[in-house]
Amino acid sequence: MNINFRRYREQKGISQESVASGLGISVDQVKNYEQFPAQVPMGMAVKWLQILGVDIATAMSEEIPPLPGIEPGSPYAELYRRLNLLNQYIDENSFLPWLELPTELRIPNDLQEQINQYYQKPNVVLTGAFDSGKSYLANTLLGQKVLPTGYQPATRVITIVCHVESRPEWFDGNVGIIDEKFWQDENGKLNFDFLYLENRERCQKHFLQFGSFDLLEKYGVHQYDDSDDSNEGGHTAIVYVDAPLLKACNLIDLPGYSDKQDEVSKDVEKANSATKIANVLLYASPAKGHINGQDMVRLRNLLRLLPTPENECNDFPTLGNFFIVATHADPSIPDDELPKILNKASARLYKELDETAIEFRRKLTKRDITKEDVQKRFFTFWSEKPDRCQRLFDDLTQLLCETLPKPVISRIDREINAVKKDKKQEYANSIEQYQTTVAKIEEYRKELDKAEKNEPERQREMRQKRSQVSKQIKELEKDTRKSFQTYAEKKIDVEFIEQMIRQRYDKQK
Ligand SMILES: Nc1nc2c(ncn2[C@@H]2O[C@H](COP(=O)(O)OP(=O)(O)O)[C@@H](O)[C@H]2O)c(=O)[nH]1
Ligand SMILES: [Mg+2]
């Protein structure tokens, strides 16, 4: 419990000595606990409050407020508004049953699919060894206790925290647990494709349970047997929370790397897959013993996998989406000691990865990466000491509210404009066809008009021509009769018939 024992003691005018004797501990211990009230065991806290004469309920309601969390604003609100509008427009205009067009219009379903992908927020992934303070850091960034913290047995739960606004209607509660097969692609390979979460059928098949935040505790402390292959994919918890941070990103808390050799550990595969979907990576490593050998191996791997927004935007800071956080930077480490820890660790990292992962990234981004660039990516964190969190929070806020959205929004604008231009051309062609037809219709209509006006005259001409033809037929008939008669009279003659018979028949009888 984060109780401000010191403030209550000072208000009541009680000395540290009398608290110490009342609790049966040393004065130094009292001093230490006053500095780290979260470390006071529950039983002692109750007794302590009794000594100070403070009611437990009051103390609980007045717990030291956690840091407010970071507030990057709503960098995508305007983008989403425009996407919504576009989607709505497509929905309303896709089907025009009343419009019986002779040619088929293309229904832009494919465009809608593309638009849906644009709603994906950047993913901030937290990784590092077990107990390095990832979940605690995540809670502090969120400004509320969402994820279970504490020295826990090795859990394999990946926690994805999203803004409550993006919760699907069918999602019941704040937390959903997905089984291990959810992330497997058709080849059975682990693939953290966030679009799987949009696939309702897939979700229905793999969601094990819905509930409130206490579900996280339940699944969080469950210990899995590593030899059990069915757990390979690991469980995932999807959590919907109302926190300002989540307006600008999703937060993903990975299960820590175990103490096992990385070569045999499934954690490595998981962390590597998750890094591919990370737009921002926060690597936690305790300030004491900051960046040990294991960390170095993992960081070499992660640095190769982390996306390179540098390539999308020229003024994106070098390694700007990569944060190495010296956690547990508590007051037992003196102020002047901390910069030394960071400098030493960053120099070591630079030296060890200069020719491998850092060189790989130089080639990938076509940018130099200096020792100073690397040094700038090291931060400290201890939630009770805001001055030791400030640089991390400021840098992350700036990244989430401006540096990251800018290139993303301009890319989306570019792509949508290209689609619009494309469609415009397509529709322009159709329109041209219709216009040609319409223009011809006008022409024909004019001709029809003319013909209709001319109809009586045409009829008269027809009648005249018809009577001419009839007259001619009659005349020709007369002529024919006449010439036939002349011909017949010539042939029906006694002399002529006799001659014909004599010529044609042999038998004289
Ligand atoms: N008081 C305090 N405790 C911290 C802080 N960071 C980590 N811890 C403690 O360190 C332990 C391990 O932290 P946790 O976030 O669970 O580690 P994870 O395994 O990396 O997620 C927990 O008991 C936390 O309460 C901090 O900033 N302040
Ligand atoms: Mg944790």
Image: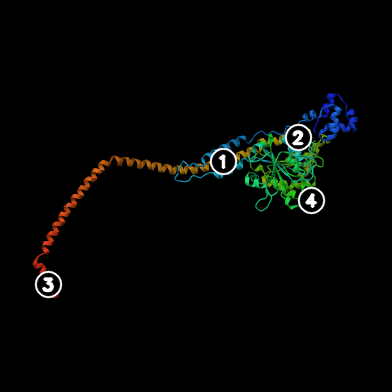
| Label pair 2/1, CB-CB below 8 angstroms | no
Q: Which is in the foreground here, disc 3 or disc 1? A: 3
Going from the N terminus, do you reach mark 3 or mark 1 first?
A: 1
Look at mark 3 in the image and give the residue it sits on: 502
Circle 3 or circle 2, nearest the eye: 3
- Badge 4 or badge 2: first in the primary sequence: 4
Q: Which amino acid does label 2 sit on?
A: Cys
Q: Distance between the residues labelled 4 and 2?
A: 32 Å
Residue at which label 4 appears: 261
- Using the image as rendered, state which of residue 317 and residue 474 is in the foreground: 474
Q: Type of residue at label 4?
A: Gln
Q: Residues under labels 4 and 1: Cα distance?
A: 47 Å
Q: Nearer the viewer, mark 4 or mark 2?
A: 4
Considering only order in the chain, which callout, 1 or 4, is on the residue closer to the N terminus?
4
> In the image, residue 460 lies at what x, y percent?
23, 43
Which three-letter amino acid code belongs to the residue tagged 1? Ile
Placement of the C terminus among the 4 image quadrants: bottom left
Element at label 1: helix
Q: In this rendered view, identify the residue nearer to me: 329 or 199.
A: 199
Q: What whole-number distance in Å separates the C-alpha atoms at marks 3 and 2?
A: 143 Å
Q: In which quarter of the image is ligand 1?
A: top right
| Lower position in the chain sequence, tag 2 or tag 1 | 2
Residue 20 found in image quarter: top right
Does mark 1's beta carbon lie closer than 8 Å to ligand 2? no
Distance Cα–Cα, label 4 vs label 3? 136 Å
The residue where tag 2 is placed is 389
Q: What residue type is labelled 3?
A: Arg
**Of the image marks 4 and 3, the number of the one nearer the N terminus:** 4
Q: What element carries label 4?
A: loop
**Relative to residue 392, is residue 459 drawn left or right?**
left
